Amino acid sequence: MIFEVFRQERKGQAFAHAGSIAAPDAEFAEAWAREQYGRRGESEALWLVPRGAIHAVTDWADEFDLKYRRVDGYSIKARLKEARERAGTTPA
Amino acid sequence: MDARTEEFLAYLHEGGAVEVNDWMPDEYRKRAIKFIEMHGNSELMGVLPEREWILRAPTLQRKLALTAKVQDEVGHAQLIYRVVEDLGKPREDCLRDLVSGKAKFHNVFHYPTKTWGDVGVIAWLVDAAAIISQKALLKCSYAPYARIMKKICWEESFHILHGRDVILALVTGTDEQRGLVQEALDRWWGPLMQFHGTQIPADEDPMVHWRIKSQGNEEARQQFLEGYVPQIWELGLTVPDPKLRRRDDGVWEYTEPDWDELKSVVTGHGPRSAERLDFRRRFLEQEKWVRDAVLAA
Amino acid sequence: MSERARLLLELADDELIVGWRESEWTGIAPTLEEDVAFSSIAQNEIGHARAAYELAARDLGTDADALAFDRPPEEYRCAPLVELRLLEWAPAIARRYLYEAADAVRIEALMASDDPEVAGLAAKIEREEAYHRMHAELWHERLRNEPRYRDALERLWPYALGVLPEPLRPRLSERVPDLVSDKLSQAIERGEHTSELAELWEEMTSVRRSAPGAEW
């Protein structure tokens, strides 16, 4: 079985994918992951997840240009400039 | 070349990353497997010359440090073979090809270690040469490999410190201890100069073309010389190459390495190649029952 | 030599030599993952040895490395169990398992010592030993029905008894309840070394002896 290893470096941080371990079961996976990802005390915590339990999502549709949902969909600069000019508050 | 492969190559040349389930041309997959597998083999075979010195370490501190260093290398082999397995070649097949002599490992691990001086020179200079290549591999287009290189490079930084410490203790010790370092350096210089491979231009190197390597061989070798020859000289040690010098334009000149020796060694004819592969094979076979009975998932 | 120094040297020599034997698996364990795990166990043991040597060294007016490497083989106080070269997996695991059990009994006794330094050292060792025991149990469960493993346990049982002084031996039997038939077999006592120690010592001290008194 392949176990994916997610590792938290310090308390408060997100768990990040750190690699994988091939092991016959969760007990061996734990024993070996402790060594591979913790022998220098470099990990606060590990999550071991059987690869089969991971449901990957990799395809997306954005056919109708829904830019308003993203930061780059707004052109604030030009309108702000015009508003300041109208109010006479353009910075020097 | 078909259109899809051309597109893929263009994507690589723009700096694109490849993940395990992405479509990739057979050529790319084959080359990635071969390159990464050789790295795994090298980490594993590199353990054997150093193992003897764990057993002979002259202080408790050195014993612990050397054990930890070698342990890291086995750990690297595990990470690397896992990547190769996900690309399509199971670890059992890699090990079978290694011990049968079909697959290669780096030249330096085919040579004997004779004294504690070798322990220092290997950890200081051989590891340094390897780290230069490994840092360049952080930019490998095959992302799972690039990611494990981060952990590998982090751990290698401890090895260089350890090597430097061992060397400094010897060069500040007795005359005999100093002699151990110089003698080891004299023996290891040739293989070190061959380590990064022939002077094939980067734009003619297929591994660079497929963005598996991001650095040409000569660039790596020059980096090594620039970083480490001054360190060697400042300790009052000599390099056994009368032609070695740094030009005004910063390029290091040196005696042409023995490329025949390199070829012969990596095809399994090095002084310790057969013996080490036999040793590895003996234990693989002896403990096959453990893998079959206990560790089969 | 004080009782305390004697006890500390027994512990230290056992841990040093068993750590040395376990280092022989470097690069050749059945899997890479096990290679890494075994190596951590060996490092922990050498670390325990160092801590025990350091305590003893103060009593004896020397230093830890001198105690570890500069005594002749006959002065080591290790038990025969740790001296055996066991380069097959079943016996190697059998020794792991039995040594951990015996060590657990010993450490438990040392933790109850009136001497705070000895008790403190034992408590520190105990915290690392939890992981060693986890590993040994894991393998013991997987191999318990393997004939070569059962044979190895039987063969090594008298050696395991010899790790402990006689009053503590019943506690060892309690920890290994089901697998070993002849619980009261003749212990192979600490005090006389196997023929294997001399060869081990030769190799272990070869570099150090090449420049006596030098710094490394």
Image: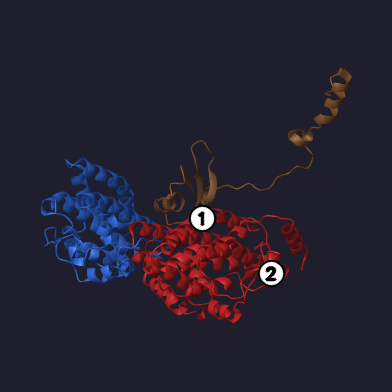
Mark 2 Cα shell of 10 Å, populated few (<14), some (14-19), many (≥20): few
Q: Secondary structure at mark 1?
A: helix
Q: Amino acid at mark 2?
A: Pro
Q: Nearer the viewer, mark 1 or mark 2?
A: 1
Q: Which image quadrant is residue C92 in?
A: bottom left
Q: Which chain is brown?
A: A
Q: Amino acid at mark 1?
A: Ser
Residue B49 placement (x, y as % from top left): 43, 70
Q: Is residue C67 above or below residue B98?
A: above
Q: Residue at x 31, y 47 (%)?
A: C130
Q: How is the image coloured?
A: by chain
Say which colour chain C has.
Answer: blue
In this view, the residue in front, B216 or C152, is B216
Q: Which image quadrant is residue B27 in?
A: bottom right
Residue at the spot of label 1: B157
Residue at the spot of label 2: B206
Q: Is residue B71 left or right of residue B35?
A: left
Q: CA distance from mark 1 to mark 2?
A: 29 Å
Q: Is residue C24 visible?
A: no
